[in-house]
Image (cartoon, rainbow, N blue to C red):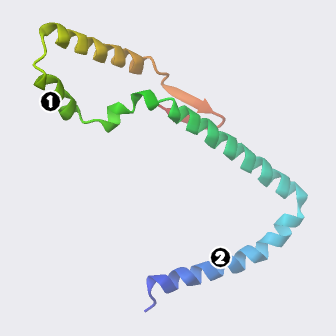
Amino acid sequence: DASFGEFVAVCKRLARRHMHSMHRPLAADMAIVRNVLRLTGSLHGLALAVEEHVGSYAGFAHLWTASVREEVGRFLATQPSADAIIVQLAKYAALEARVDGLPPFAAYGPLVLNT
């Protein structure tokens, strides 16, 4: 019975042995090296584009970080007037319009992000 740690160590040794056996022939082929570098650059560019896209939703972060119950409780604790309630509802309607105005998807190369 081998422990999980021993199993991981054996897997790492096998991976190293396999990696060394494949590394030299692959590294010697300049076409493979060029393609690997192109793919690496493409993935890096894709990651930056996706990070920027996800960052564009920062203005909506309160929708998934704030507690609705706490916000409503704080608002109601102020004993708002009818006008204050109407103003608050208008804010939520404007927020809903902003969300509805978001594009349904964003395409970055072969990757499509559904919103």
Q: Quadrant of residue 22?
A: bottom right
Q: Point out residue 56 in the picture as x, y percentages from the top left corner.
A: 51, 29
Q: Point out residue 15 in the picture as x, y percentages from the top left corner.
A: 65, 76
Q: Amino acid at mark 2?
A: Ala
Q: Residue furthest bottom?
A: 1
Which residue corresponds to mark 1? 73
Q: Point out residue 58 in the picture as x, y percentages from the top left corner.
A: 45, 31
Residue 96's tag is none
What residue is shown at x 66% (from left), y 35% (from top)?
109
Whichever of labels 2 and 1 marks the residue nearer the N terminus, that label is 2
Mark 1 residue element: helix
Which residue corresponds to mark 2? 15
What residue is shown at x 55% (from left), y 32% (from top)?
53
Nearer-the-camera pick, 60 or 78: 78
Whole-number angstrom distance, CA of label 2 to CA of label 1: 56 Å
Does 17 appear above or below 26?
Answer: below
Left or right of residue 27: residue 103: left
